Image (cartoon, helix red, strand yellow):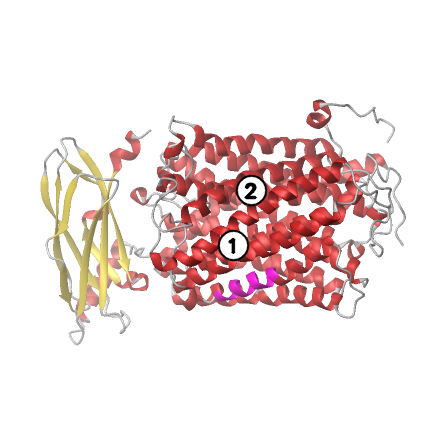
Amino acid sequence: MQVSQKQANARTTRKILLIVVFMFSFGFFVLPPLYAAICDVFGLNGRFIELKKVERAEYIVNVEKRIDESRTIRIEFLTTLNQKLNWEFRAKQNTIDVHPGKVTEVMFYAKNLTNRKVVAQAIPSVTPGYAAKYFSKMECFCFSQQTFEPGEARDMPLRFYVDPNLPKKVKTISLGYTFFDTNRKLASK
Amino acid sequence: MSEHHAAPTGITRWLFTTNHKDIGTLYLWFSFIMLLLGGSMAMVIRSELMYPGMQVVDPNFFNMMTTMHGLIMVFGAIMPAMVGLANWLIPMMIGAPDMALPRMNNWSFWILPGAAILLVAPMFMGGDFMAGQGPAFGWTFYEPLSGQYGKLAFFVFAVHLLGFSSIMGSINIIATILNMRAPGMTLMKMPMFVWTWLITAFLLIAVMPVLAGVVTMMLTDKYFGTSFFDAAGGGDPVMFQHVFWFFGHPEVYIMILPAFGVVSMIIPTFARKKLFGYASMVYATAAIAFLSFIVWAHHMFTVGMPVAGELYFMYATVMIAVPTAVKVFNWTATMWKGSMTFEIPMLWAIAFVFMFTIGGFTGLMLGLTPVDFQYHDTYFVVAHFHYVLVTGSLFAIIAAFYYWVPKWTGNMYPPLLSKIHFWASLISVNVLFFPQHFIGLAGMPRRIPDYAVQFADWNYWSSIGGFAFGLSQILFLVIVIKTIKGGEKATDQVWESAEGLEWTIPSPAPYHTFATPPEVK
């Protein structure tokens, strides 16, 4: 009687420990990629859908045929520096008005005011979030890390178009960029 | 059960004990100490907020107080108190000689003081105490702010230890309930308190590992170069909120379900009727537990979700009102036409039903997406969760103390002091928290040390209520000590119409009970 109860307790404990391991793995290994995947698929949270290169080329040809001149969308550019990064960073123009489907190029200006080499990464964000999947970038300084020598300044291009399928209610899209110092993260350790 | 030695005495009795009653006592004392510690931090908060302007502490110290108050009350006071009640009561209620895994039971308690020290220690590091060296990022420790905190590792490891403790405690409770019930006690004959704890333990098993996961991600982000939440590396701070609240919403039910169980035990005794709708109570508890997993994003309506998501989380949230209302109506129906008497535990239980329902209603308001945009992060939220956690969970814990302490100690509580304790607490807690609804609706944000003068009057009254409520709990400490030391002797039955196995054993409960299992018809 006593032994069988011990066995029953051990069996219950093993089963519950399985749940514990399962839930930790779910939280640690499954939720983050799942979150990223859901955001990408639905274009949530200002994240972009990255089209494959071939798809993008085809798509752009089609988009250029569908320029919607009846609508004008105002694009606002916002720039932010994170972690007290001592840089100058701004868009060359604060806003631009575009027709959906028209490929447009704008320039951003950045200057490294520090006396050290800085490798920085710009992270984009689109507001309203549901407009993110209609805002397609063909070339962007945010696609890769940018290395700046001490005191270096340069203009960086962004080429984009707004998909003509953009919901009619959207009149303005805000595109924000935040520059992060990638050295700092490694240096802080 | 022939291997029993003579009980050791002194400190080793408590250090090495595997007795469920000793461990229950340890848990309850630990949570009381934490209640007083967290409460004294609340006194600092209310002192600063008594008048507009900065007068008592620095803003960072204030932030540290709100953070530590929340963490200590949630993880140090309410949760251990519930586990303490479970330890004391579940074996006695189901006719088991002890918990299923007594040695692990010892571990799950003795991890707690270590976790508490890790959590509190950073406050005293780095010389200047008043500068506020401890965590100051709010009890929800949102990234990216929390990721910049210099002593994050202390916090992370404290949470890990708390998680280990909770998981081990839950394994014990589940194994005890599933394997050690007396012959004849089927699942649907279990006392309601046992049922609510069985479900709570499964909630803990499911979400404490997720909490461990989220703090581990913070740790690797800070010290090992990952980027779960760090936007610079492609991570997303919003994901922190999703993962945190995936833990956090079930957590709030972890703190209230055992309270439901306590109240479901007390009200039938003093209404002298069987609990109305026992089966529906069980199903309602299970339904609340299930729903708690699918509503987490209602804590973050303003984070920028798509409308479809907002609507889904709103409907799912408001749906929780249905099983919760089943419970409230069942308690009311139990009292309906009962021969009610108003002993101290019953007073606390009725206060619980009434004021928990107020907290439930404000929860419904907060669950509606459009209005939540106005209420989010205001004092209205503070008022809401204090009504469910203080006049809800804490009141139920105090009710449980008065109800079972004659069984634990063999002594009745001092009647006059206990009455003063109840009425002082009831009045002061409402003076404390009810005005916070008004200042919240008027727009006062939470977690700020200073505020616009338009909020001054109600903050003043709220502080007065806060000090009175704090003093009332000092009286509670006096009552606890007096009751342990002596008082009118309790009978074995204690309450005229109390039902359940725990009332069949002598008062005070002997060190070992139900060595031979009782027969349940």
**Residue type of the residue flagged with mark 2:** Phe
Marks 1,2: beta carbons within 8 A: no
**Residue furthest out toward the bottom:** A70
Q: Main secondary structure of the magenta part?
A: helix
Element assignment for label 1: helix
Residue B363 falls inside the magenta stretch: yes
**Residue appearing at x 78%, y 59% in the figure:** B270
The image shows residue B415 at horizontal and vertical percentages of 75, 49
The image shows residue B301 at horizontal and vertical percentages of 42, 60
Question: Residue B50's mark?
Answer: none
Pointer 2: residues within 10 angstroms few (<14), some, or many (20+)? Answer: many
Question: Residue B75's mark?
Answer: 2
Q: Which segment is the magenta one?
A: B355-365
- Of the pair B216 and A165, the residue shown nearer to us: B216
Element assignment for label 2: helix
Q: Is residue B378 visible?
A: no
Q: Tag 1, which chain?
A: B
Residue B255 falls inside the magenta stretch: no
Q: Which residue is mark 1?
A: B432
Quadrant (top left/top right/bottom left/bottom right) for the N terminus of chain B: top right
Front of the two marks 1 and 2: 1
Q: Tag 2, which chain?
A: B
